[in-house]
Structures are given as structure tokens and as C-alpha cells.
Image: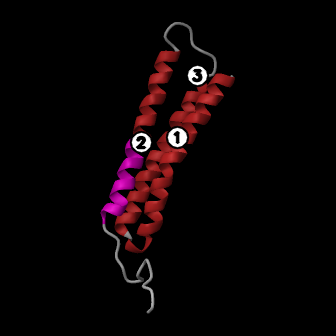
Amino acid sequence: MEATPAVQPGRTWRPWTIWLPGVLALVWSLLLIVADNLAGVMGSWDTPAPGLRWLWVGVIGHCALAAASVLVLVVGLSSPSRLRAAAITAWMIIPVGFGWALLTGHLISGS
């Protein structure tokens, strides 16, 4: 008895396989942009805290990740042959955004 492969070669991916990670990555990146901006406002209330310039680096990085998530979503929807790679890339944007936020926070506290 021959075992069937886990993924058949002619199998088509459903549209939700790119919509879900693409939209989650975009929303996550936008929330991190909002968090960076709120941290900038809170850090400059009385006397500006040292290292606030690193918040702009965080905002720029999260904007790049938001743009990348939109690009990955468009590529995944327009090219079915690249759907799997686009979905994996969209899922990877989420932890990269978290890591970027941690790095920005470390740079702010170290300045």
C-alpha cells in the first residue's frame, strides 16, 4: 500500500491562506507604528528623554514592514504560483516587527 503525499502537486491554495497573514501583518505593523508614536509623545511631555531619536528609526522600520505586508499581499493574490512564499513571508513579518520593537526599545534605553 503506497502512502499519499501530504501535499499534492496540483493542489490549489485557498485565498484565505494569504488574506489572513497579510492582513494580520499589516494590522500588527500599524499598531506598532501607533505604539512608537505614543511612546514619542509620552517621552517628550516634560523634558525630552534621551534617545527619543531612535523612535523615528522604529517608525521607519515599522512603516517598511507595513509596506512589505501590503506588497506580499498583492503579490500573493496576483500570482497563485507565489502564494505559498507570500504567505510564509507575511507570517514572518509579525515576529520581525516584534523584534524591531524590542531593538528600538533597547536602543532608546541604552542612549
Q: Whole-percent x and y of residue 48?
A: 57, 13
Answer with mark 2 or mark 1, whichever residue precedes in sequence: 2
**Amino acid beneath label 2:** Trp
Q: Which residue is labeled 3 in the image? A: 52
Q: Whole-percent x and y of residue 6?
A: 43, 77
On-image quarter of the N terminus: bottom left
Rounded to the nearest whole Å, what is the CA distance between mark 1 and mark 3? 19 Å
Q: Mark 2 falls on what kind of element?
A: helix
Rounded to the nearest whole Å, what is the CA distance between mark 3 and mark 2? 22 Å
Answer with mark 1 or mark 3, whichever residue precedes in sequence: 3
**Amino acid beneath label 1:** Phe
Q: Which residue is labeled 1 in the image? A: 98
Answer few, some or many: residues within 10 Å of disc 2's Cα (few below 14, many 20 plus, some between 14 and 19).
many
Q: Are marks 3 and 2 in contact (CB under 8 Å)?
A: no
Principal SS element in the magenta part?
helix
User: Which mark, residue 36?
Assistant: none
Q: Choose mark 1 or mark 3, whichever is in front.
A: 1
Q: Which residue is labeled 2 in the image? A: 28
Q: Residue at x 33, y 57 (%)?
A: 19
- Magenta residues span 15-27
Residue 108 horizontal side relative to residue 86, left or right: right
**Amino acid beneath label 3:** Leu
Answer few, some or many: residues within 10 Å of disc 1's Cα (few below 14, many 20 plus, some between 14 and 19).
some
